[in-house]
Amino acid sequence: MSGPAKQPVHLRVLRGTYSGPLPDTPATSGLPPLDSLPSAPAWLKDPVARGEWRRLGTVLVGARLLNSGNVTLLEQACATYGKLARIWSRGAPANAALTMSYRALLNSLGLLAWNPPPGPRPGNRFGNNAKGARIP
């Protein structure tokens, strides 16, 4: 028997299990970063959301991460933050879906770099049970 079929390279790259040289990727035309923050969209009426527009937009423009292709993501992130702020101001807990949507939008904008640590956490007494895990 030859064993299970190998996963495609692009899936192994996404999972972080591909250790060879990266395959040739077609050249993409990157969008140029915006030099200044555009004005907030007219539909973004919540003052908290507009404040988040100025705060996040300034950070994104300064880091040269904002371009014409991801301005919509910034709009959605600010609107989501405004909704979260309204929920929190009432003393209610925000639901997980809304919170994770906000985090996903921030991650898509390049503001979160969350990479889980490889392998089990130090001090995990079950860490040796993980396949291929080595605990120092």
Image (spheres, rainbow, N blue to C red):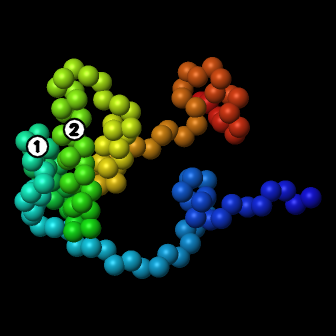
- Decide if residue 114 is on the left or right side of residue 4: left
Q: Position of residue 15 (x, y in %)?
A: 57, 52
Hey, what amino acid is under mark 2?
Answer: Lys
The residue identified by callout 2 is 83
What's the mark number on residue 46? 1
Q: Give the answer, above or below, for where 125 lies relative to 99.
A: above
Quarter occupied by residue 2: bottom right
Q: Is residue 76 visible?
A: yes
Place of residue 17 in the rendered image (x, y in percent of width and height, measured from the top left): 61, 53
Residue located 80% across and 56% down the image: 4
Q: Amino acid at mark 1?
A: Asp
Q: Quadrant of the N terminus?
A: bottom right
Sequence-wise, which precedes: disc 2 or disc 1?
1
Residue 93, quarter of the rendered image: top left
Question: In the image, is residue 99 above or below residue 10?
Answer: above
Q: Gap in Å between the C-alphas at discs 2 and 1?
A: 9 Å
Answer with the quarter of the image where residue 27 lies: bottom left
From what the image shows, is residue 89 above or below residue 47?
above
Q: Please, what secondary structure does the residue beneath circle 1 have?
A: loop
- In what element is the residue under mark 2? helix
Q: Quadrant of the C terminus?
A: top right
Q: Which mark is residue 61?
A: none
Q: Which residue is found at the position 64% from the left and 27% from the top?
A: 127
Q: Residue at x 58, y 32 (%)?
A: 120
Q: Mark 1 Cα within 10 Å, few/some/many (few <14, many 20+)?
A: some
Residue 58 left/right relative to 24: left
Q: Are there few (<14), some (14-19), or many (20+) residues within 10 Å of tag 2?
A: some
Looking at the image, residue 84 sits to the left or right of residue 21; the answer is left
At which x and y percent is residue 134?
A: 65, 34
| Residue 55 appears anywhere in the view | no
